Amino acid sequence: MALIITDECINCDVCEPVCPNGAIAMGELIYGIDPGRCTECVGHFDEPQCQVVCPVQCIPPDPAWPESRDALLAKALRLKAGSAGSAGPAGPAEPSVPAAAAPGIAPGMQAERVPAAESDPGLGAECGALRESRPAPS
């Protein structure tokens, strides 16, 4: 099943760059996950990278999007095939589901990012440490 970012998100900006499918994008208030692009990192990693780096563990499975491991792998292969001709890593795409079905992701909307680390100095070291320790994208 796809993952979902709950309202406990602190907008620390560490989940978006580790998503190999570009499924994570800034919503109106917090980050959101496009379930049409989320594969729980199946086909890329052993565990969802957004969950690994999230300092507040606010990214559980989304029960509204049940999918087997085989279905997630098939989705990952489709996404890889679709980006084979691109000039660089795939960035966040328009959601493949209506905005009403994917709350937190507004199609075509650009939001200004305000990292939580800037507004809460206590988070700066924690988020910075996570950014430095995460593996480089492949």
Image: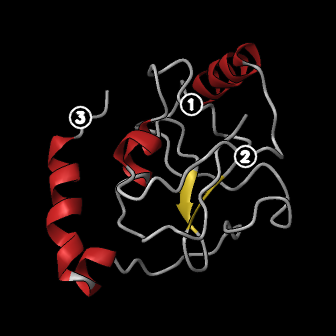
Residue assigned mark 1? 83
Label 3 CA crowd tier, 10 Å (few <14, some 14–19, many 20+): few
Residue 15 location in percent, x, y?
42, 52
Work out whether 28 lies above or below 26: below
Residue 82 location in percent, x, y?
64, 28
Between circles 3 and 2, the one closer to the viewer is 2
* Residue at x-position 41% and y-position 59%: 56
The three-letter amino acid code for the residue at tag 1 is Ser
Work out whether 13 lies above or below 27: above
Residue 52 location in percent, x, y?
38, 40
Q: Quadrant of residue 118?
A: bottom left
Q: Measure how far apart labels 3 and 1 are at the Cα level.
A: 19 Å
Residue assigned mark 3? 136
Residue assigned mark 2? 62
Q: Measure how far apart labels 3 and 2 are at the Cα level.
A: 27 Å
* Residue at x-position 44% and y-position 22%: 45
- 89 on left or right of 67: left
Q: Between residue 16 and residue 82, name the one nearer to us.
A: 16
Check contact, mark 2 vs mark 1: CB within 8 A: no
Q: Between residue 100 and residue 67, name the one nearer to us.
A: 67
Sequence order check, earlier mark of 3 and 2: 2
* Residue at x-position 15% and y-position 54%: 129
